[in-house]
Image (cartoon, grey):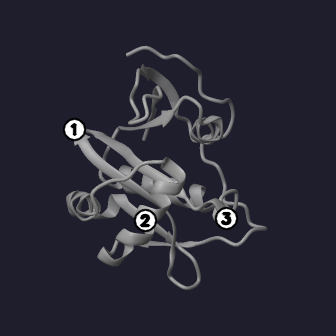
Amino acid sequence: MRCIADTAPGRTEAPVPSDRPSARLRGFRPDDVVPIAAIVEEALHERYDPSLYGSLSAEWPDGFLVAVDADDRPVGFLLGVTQVPGEARVLMFAVERDHRARGVGALLMDAFLAASRGRGFQRATLEVRVSNATAIRFYARYGYSVVDLLRSYYSDGENGYQMARPV
């Protein structure tokens, strides 16, 4: 494995901003499929078979975190999977546009890393579009660094970075 970019210096756990409203977290429920699919389409520009969410949730229920507003409506989510022994992978992670920069992503990532530590994982990985500088900066604040370039990784042909960090 080769490192392409260094992790940002300093803090590796980003705090939730205290001056902004934050969501609360809960586990995935089957009635979350429609709102989560809408978040995926808007934020990730992808469409998946709706049955995917339920089947992946069954594999690691504590790895599928849903951020909800005061009305229990999903405003973000992080879908973690375990495909490699000792490793947690962020398969999908997105927050509705109106709820970004309000600590929702930090809340989700903090809980995911805690769940990963609880399962005894040693490493966490994810993939991100090379053009998504905001997400790359967010992940770097959490101690992720680029470990590989994934050519034509996304359905539209865009390259991706694989990023990783110790848990």
Residue 111 seen in render: no
Say which residue appears at 47% left-offset and 29% top-offset.
158
Q: Quadrant of the N terminus?
A: top left
In this figure, which residue is indicated by the disc labeled 1? 85
Label 2 close to label 3 by CB (< 8 Å): no
Up the image or down, 12 lies above or below 113; here it is above
Mark 2 nearby-residue class (10 Å; few <14, some 14–19, many ≥20): many
Place of residue 17 in the rendered image (x, y in percent of width and height, measured from the top left): 72, 61
Label 2 vs 3, first from the N-terminus: 2
Quarter-of-image position of residue 26: bottom left
* Residue at mark 2 to residue at mark 1: CA–CA distance: 27 Å
Residue 133 seen in render: yes
Label 2 close to label 1 by CB (< 8 Å): no
Q: Nearer the viewer, mark 1 or mark 3?
A: 3
Place of residue 140 in the rendered image (x, y in percent of width and height, measured from the top left): 60, 35
* Residue at mark 2 to residue at mark 3: CA–CA distance: 15 Å
What kind of residue is marked 3?
Asp
In this figure, which residue is indicated by the disc labeled 2? 36
What kind of residue is marked 1?
Pro
Label 1 vs 3, first from the N-terminus: 1
